[in-house]
Image (cartoon, rainbow, N blue to C red):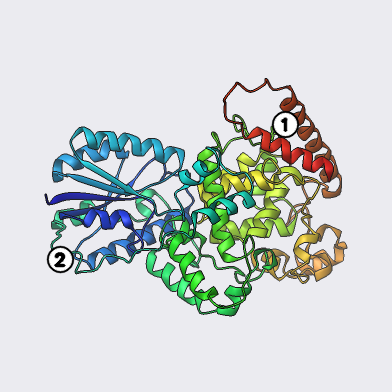
Amino acid sequence: MAHVCIHWFRKGLRLHDNPALIAALKDCKELYPVFIMDPNLHSSEVGISRWRFLIGALKDLDSSLRKLNSRLFVLRGKPEEVFPKLFSKWKVTKLTYEYDTEPYSLSRDEKVTSLAKETGIDVIYKISHTLYNIERIIEENDGKPPLTYKRLQAIVAKLGPPEKPIPAPTLDDMKDVKTPCSEKDEKKYGIPTLEEFGLDSTSLGEELFPGGEQEALRRLDEHMKKTGWVCSFEKPQTSPNSLNPSTTVLSPYVTFGCLSARTFWWRLTEVYRGKKHSDPPVSLHGQLLWREFFYTCSLGIPNFNKMKGNTVCTQVDWDTNQDYLAAWREARTGFPFIDAIMTQLRQEGWIHHLARHAVACFLTRGDLWISWEEGQKVFEELLLDGDWALNAGNWQWLSASAFFHQFFRVYSPIAFGKKTDKNGDYIKKYLPLLKKFPPQYIYEPWKAPRSVQQAAGCIVGKDYPHPIVQHEQVSKKNVQRMKEAYARRSTASSESPIKKQGEKRKSLSVVDMLQKKARKE
């Protein structure tokens, strides 16, 4: 039977390594590639840089599909309301999509799949957003997500290397497939502009990371040519405040699925072959396995993006302070290193992972004692690579709420940046107001004599804020508060009722193990 098929693009905004798209083309006479602007995902809470990246990715995808005599149909609305109309209008007999493990995506896909099956439509989904089948990793770990990177490594070593990526469809694959499209459809299903969503594109700076599969593959090729750099790459040795990125910045492309994680993995394997190279967790392969680690946790741990109801997350009595939160979000903390990072984030949609460490620690356990959930929301809005699982996992890690338990290690908002940028060139780039301060004061402008401030054309307290906290004092106090939260967690664990016979061990016991380890240290 020749099918009329919808391939539903969500993430996976690419033609290469797209097994669900290839499945759509099998026994297909008509193909409708669809993307739906879902109000639950594509709302005003998404920052303008992310919107720009998404629209760029959709334009690129549409352009690639047109080279195959097809096109992208962009619709707006809730998928469960949009699809029944399309099923009927286009007389659809098959629906394909890439599997997504986010809680919202799973419930959305369940609704759409049952609607499709009610009307006799075949539904096929394929796994290609992650290196492995995440559910298989959990199965291999006795039905629980591995809570340490080493445990994840042991499981994937047993599973063997990830599947090899498959090539993009060709004109030959499309020779018997049509995409019916009228001139009216051009307007009706066209790619939206930023202005359509009421966003002012004049406020945007230069687009440093344009969205789309072609750009992703170009950047991948560029990096893979630097074989020495790729082989010696160690993430902790890269700089948080270099003027140009010291890492690949391929993460936004992997997040939106413009670049397949498996393609990235196997291209690295080719570069590594026969050469001495760094290893996980610090290598580039290691970075892809960190992604897999947090994806696995996010699927296996309920309420993963919240503190309450999250079994691996320490319950902390975070403060609610809207003034502090706004100062952090708007780069008004009075600590130039922190404010420069938050300015770069807002302007460019990307910051180095160690810069993320610095501002996350500052917001939570280091200085402001504000919940990691608040930081998670800001990153989700502003980061081009804001990925639900990685964002939640990293915020728990950096706030020492889960996975990482050395809460007594606090990033200094002054000394940390100096390690790699003594002159403060990074601060001067993102906070030009401070560019005339001499190096000895640029990280602590409030310590500069009044005459130095006047010569620099910036008076602290008038042109640039005083620090909102005294770091030395609050960080010591917060270490104590964290100690108390850990002690409460330990008490709660020891008072918990004995587990029922035959019940799987809860992941909380792994947290207990971490607690014991922390006490030993």
Q: Position of residue 278 (x, y in %)?
A: 63, 69
Q: Nearer the viewer, mark 1 or mark 2?
A: 2
| Picture coordinates of residue 442, whole percent (x, y) | 78, 65
Above or below, 181 against 69 in this view is above
Residue at x 42% of width, y 52% of height: 199
Instruction: Estimate the x, y position of residue 77 in percent, counting from the top left.
Output: 31, 40
Rate crowding at label 1 as few (under 14), some (14 to 19) or many (20 or more) other CA atoms within 10 Å.
few
Q: Is the residue 259 above or below the residue 91 in the image?
A: below
Q: CA distance from mark 1 to mark 2?
A: 62 Å
Q: Give the residue at x 18% y 37%.
A: 120
Quickly name the residue at label 1: 317
Q: Amino acid at mark 1?
A: Asp
Q: Which residue is mark 2?
A: 175
- Describe residue 37's horizontal placement relative to residue 385 as left or right: left
Side of 310 relative to 165 (left or right): right
Task: Name the spot of residue 221 as percent of width and height, x first.
Answer: 46, 75
